[in-house]
Image (cartoon, rainbow, N blue to C red):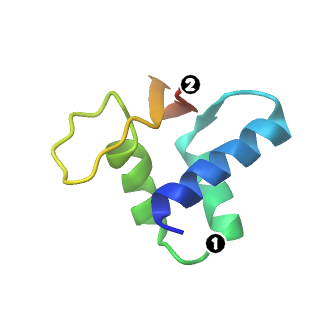
Amino acid sequence: MICRDEVLAAMLRLCNRHDRDVFSLSEIVHETLATSSRYRESTIRTHVTAHMCKQNPHHCGSCYDDLDRVGYGLYELRSG
């Protein structure tokens, strides 16, 4: 799995476990690291804040609109 896949899987686990949709960057990073040591914390943080976030200006090569930034350091999965 690529980092994006691991972050998305971590977000789904968090949503199911906590019955809420909004999570802090720290929660997402910790959940991703708890199930995989393949990526460094800095890589996961960059994916969440830059590559996967709709509200971030997309200056990088591969960008996705997987997450919405709903507050300072708070993210939720975008619905369809």
The structure residue drawn at horizontal position 67% and vertical position 56%, both measured from the top left corner, is 31
**Is residue 72 visible from the viewing direction of this image?**
no
Rendered view: 23 above or below 38: above
Tell me the element at label 1: loop
Instruction: In the displayed orientation, state which residue is furthest to the bottom.
Output: 38
Is residue 71 rendered to the left or right of residue 56? right
Q: Which mark is residue 36?
A: 1
As rendered, which of 1 and 67 lies closer to the eye? 1
Is residue 55 rendered to the left or right of residue 13? left
Tell me the element at label 2: loop
Query: Callout 1 environment at 10 Å: few (<14), some (14 to 19), or many (20+)?
Result: few
Lower position in the chain sequence, tag 2 or tag 1: 1
Of discs 2 and 1, which sits in the foreground?
2
Query: Callout 2 environment at 10 Å: few (<14), some (14 to 19), or many (20+)?
Result: few
The structure residue drawn at horizontal position 74% and vertical position 36%, both measured from the top left corner, is 15
Is residue 63 rendered to the left or right of residue 23? left
Please provide percent x and percent y for residue 20: 75, 27
Please provide percent x and percent y for residue 24: 58, 38
Please provide percent x and percent y for residue 19: 82, 30
Which amino acid, mark 1?
Answer: Ser
Rendered view: 46 above or below 75: below
Which amino acid, mark 2?
Answer: Ser
The structure residue drawn at horizontal position 38% and vertical position 43%, both measured from the top left corner, is 49
Instruction: In the displayed orientation, state which residue is furthest to the left.
Output: 59
Quadrant of the rendering where the N terminus is positioned = bottom right
Residue under pointer 2: 79
As rendered, which of 11 and 70 lies closer to the eye? 11
As rendered, which of 70 and 66 lies closer to the eye? 66
Rendered view: 40 above or below 17: below
Is residue 14 rendered to the left or right of residue 11? right
